[in-house]
Amino acid sequence: MKQVIFLFILIISCIALNGQITIDKTTLPDIGDELEYRLFFNYQGNSSFKDKGENLIWTYDSFSFGANDTERFEDIKKTELADSFPTANILININGFDAAAIRSENNIEVIGLSIGNFSGFDVDASADFMEPFTYRTTPFTYKDKYNDAFEFRLQFDSDLIPGLDTIPIPLPGATLDSIRIVTKVLRSEEATAWGKLNLFGQDFEVLKVEQLDSTATKIEAGLAFFGQVLWIDVTTIIGGGLGDLNNNVLTYKFMTNGSKKSVLEFRETSSMDTTGMTINTTSGRMSSDVVTAVNNVFQNEIKVFPNPTNGIVKIKSIDIVTIPDCIKVYNSNGLLVKNISEVNINNVSLFDQSNGIYILKFYKENEYLGASAISLIK
C-alpha cells in the first residue's frame, strides 16, 4: 500500500512539474528582430495579474489600445556606435535609447547606453557601465529570480541649459563649470506564477514574471573653485523640466516558451508629483500578433445591434453555421456576469446588468465563434 501511495505522489509531482513553463534560450531576441506591441493606458479592470502561485488562470477581454511600441535589435558592428562599444555584438533600441549589449547563447547583457537629446536638452552622450547589466537571461522558470543594477552619468557644459546662471552659488569666487545627471537603476525579476492566460477566447500557457525597475536621478552642478570642481545637488532647483526623476515601475509579464516577446504586460508606475504626493497608474502593452487576431475575431460575421443598447440586443449572422446557441457575457473587469444557454437571436436581454462595457462571447456546440464588445446605457 505504501508503494502505491508513493507512486501516486510521484505521478502527481511529475504532472505539476511538467505543467510549469520554462523560458529557454530560443526566446532571446537576435539581430534583425523587431518585437512589436500595442500600448494601453489607464487600465482599471481585472487586477488578477498580481496573483502568485501555480496552475493559475487569468482572463482578460477589455482593453483600449493606443500607439505601437517596438523594440529593435540591430548588428552594432554596422552602426556608428561600433567604435564606442567594441566588445558589443548587438544594439537594442528601446524608448529612444540605444543600448549596446553582448548577446551570448543564454543571456543578453547591456554594457552601455547611447543617449541623444536627453530629456529635451541638446545633449548627445554615451555611458559605459562598470559591470554588464542583465537584460534577459535563460533558462527561466517558476521561482527563479535575479537582481542587477547600473549607474550612468551624463556631464555637459552648463551653458547648454538656459537660466543656469540663476543658480545660487554658495561659495564666493566659485563659477558654474558644468552639470551632470546621475541615474541609478535597480532591477529585479522573479517568476512568481504559471498557468493559463485567456485573451479574448485564446489560451496561452504562460510563465508570469514580475520585473521591478527602480530609478533614482539627481542633478549636480559642478562649481569651479581654486582649480578644482566641487559638486552640489541642484535637483530641486532645475529638475522640474526633466519630469519624474524617481519612480518605481512594477511590470507583470506573461511569457510563453514559443515567443521572443511577452504575450501581455501590465505596468504599475509609482512616482511623486511636485507636492510630494505619490501617484500610481496602471498601463501596459500586448503582443501586436494577439491584437491583430483579436481584431479579426471582432470583425467576424456575427453582428450585435443596436450598439449602444438600452438593454435588448439582436444577433445577426449571414451563415446559419455561425448562429450561436450559447452567449457568455463578461463585464469590463473580465468577470463572467451572465451565461445565456438558450439564445433568442432577436431578444438578448442585458436589462439585469448595470451600465457599462460588456464583451459577448459566442459559442455553438461548445465551439468558440468569436466576440463583440457592446455598450449598455439604460
Image: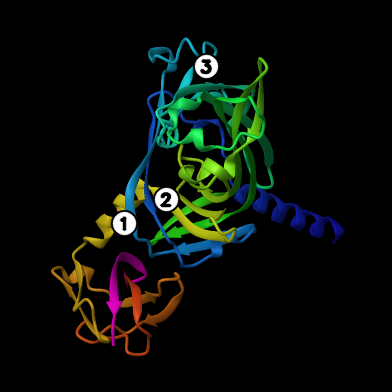
Q: Secondary structure at mark 2?
A: strand
Residue receiving disc 2: 285
Residue receiving disc 1: 294
Badge 2 amino acid: Arg
Which image quadrant: the C terminus? Answer: bottom left
Q: Position of residue 312 (x, y in %)?
A: 24, 86
Instruction: Name the one closer to the observer, 183 or 107.
Output: 183
In the rendered structure, find residue 51 and report the number of the disc placed on it.
none
Which range is magenta?
A: 363-378
Res. 69 image quadrant? top left
Q: Earlier in the sequence, mark 3 or mark 1?
A: 3
Which image quadrant: the N terminus? Answer: bottom right
Q: CB under 8 Å between callouts 2 and 3?
A: no
Instruction: Name the one closer to the observer, 66 or 347.
Output: 66
Q: CA distance from mark 2 to mark 3?
A: 29 Å
Residue receiving disc 3: 88
Tell me the chief SS of the magenta region. strand
Residue at 22% of width from left, 73% of height from top? 323
Mark 2: give few (<14), some (14-19) or many (20+) Cα within 10 Å: many
